[in-house]
Amino acid sequence: MQKKTNTPELETAIRWRVDAAGEQPTVQNYVGQKLPGAKFADRDLRGADFTNAELEGADFTNCQLQGAKFDRAILAHALFTGAKLGGASLVGANLEKSNFNKAYTSQCDFSNASLTETRFDEADLSRSQFAGATFLETRIRSARCSGAKLSNAALLRCKLIASDFSNVDFSNTSFIECALEQVRFASANVVGAGFLSCRLDNANFDQTKADYVRFMHGTTLRGTSFKAASMIRASFRGMLLDRADFRKTLLDGADFTETQCTGTNFSYASLKEVVFTKAKLRNAMFTFANLMQAVMQQSELQGANLYGANLFGVDLSRIEVDKETRFDEPHMGMIRARFN
């Protein structure tokens, strides 16, 4: 099959010129042009202006596009594989099914862009802006996203696998039916975020600011680490948290009602007024945790270790224990418990 190339007219439209010094291309103006299927691969298009251009299926593979403007451009099915877009603006662009695999997109502005089925495998999205962007079945795999801004966004059925979201702003963002296994959220801001029917197994939330975060129906958090995070009044109601790590985490007022926390580690955590009603806490670790005024009614504590924990005012009524359950003896007089 003969390889498809640009028509002479299209090639003239996209040809670039070198300035008198022979070092940098002149600013190229493609504002509003209709260039579907254009072949720009390997070109130097730094600072080019594609505002409002129609570029469906265009090929920008390995292009230099630093500082380029694609605001409100139609870029569905476009290829940006390996392209360098540092500082580019794609505000309001249609990027449906476009491909940014291995692209350098640091400090880009994707605000209000449509990212339906867009691919960012092994891309660098660090410090980029995504305010108001639409994420539907977007895939971000093994990508670097540190410092990006995704506050107040909505992500539906996205795959964010083994990517680095450290220091990212996810405040008040909604994740629905997303796959987030092995994702690193360390030191990110997820205050007020919500996770519904998401897979977060073995994710890393260490040192995150996650007050009022909500993990909802169908979400799994097995083996997830929350060490030293701030999670005041977080909701884990009904979640699967087997082997999760909450060491030194601030969880005051959090809700763990009916959670499954087999082997979960709460050592040295602040758990004041936390609700563990009907939680499955078999073999959980609470050593030196502060459980003051916590509610643990009808929880399963077989094999749990509460040595050194502050149990002042804790309600342990109708809990289930066995001979392996360990309480610090000096606190026993302050526990209101009935062992049935």
Image: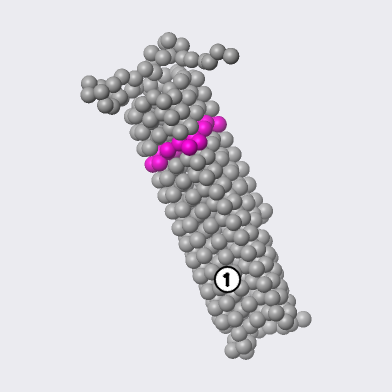
Q: What residue is rendered at 54% in x and 69% in y?
A: 247
**In what element is the residue under mark 1?**
loop
Does residue 334 show up?
Answer: no
Outermost residue, left side: 21
Find out whether residue 95 is within the magenta segment.
Answer: yes
Residue 158: x percent and y percent? 58, 43
Outermost residue, right side: 340
7 horizontally vs 213: left or right: left
Does residue 312 show up?
Answer: yes
Residue nearest the observer in this picture, 107 or 82: 82
Q: How many marks?
A: 1
* Residue 64 position (above or below residue 54): below
Q: Quadrant of residue 277?
A: bottom right
Residue nearest the observer in this picture, 149 or 204: 204
Q: What residue is rendered at 46% in x and 20% in y?
A: 39
Q: Which residues are magenta?
A: 92-111
Q: What residue is rendered at 62% in x and 51% in y?
A: 198
* Quadrant that contains the N terminus: top right
103 horizontally vs 238: left or right: left
Residue 47: x percent and y percent? 33, 29
Q: Amino acid at mark 1?
A: Phe
Q: Quadrant of residue 324?
A: bottom right
Residue 258: x percent and y percent? 68, 65
Mark 1, residues whose alpha carbon is within 10 Å: few (<14), some, or many (≥20)? many
Residue nearest the observer in this picture, 264 or 340: 264
Q: Which residue is mark 1?
A: 266
230 horizontally vs 137: left or right: left
Residue 45: x percent and y percent? 36, 26
Q: What residue is rendered at 65% in x and 63% in y?
A: 242
Q: Quadrant of residue 265?
A: bottom right
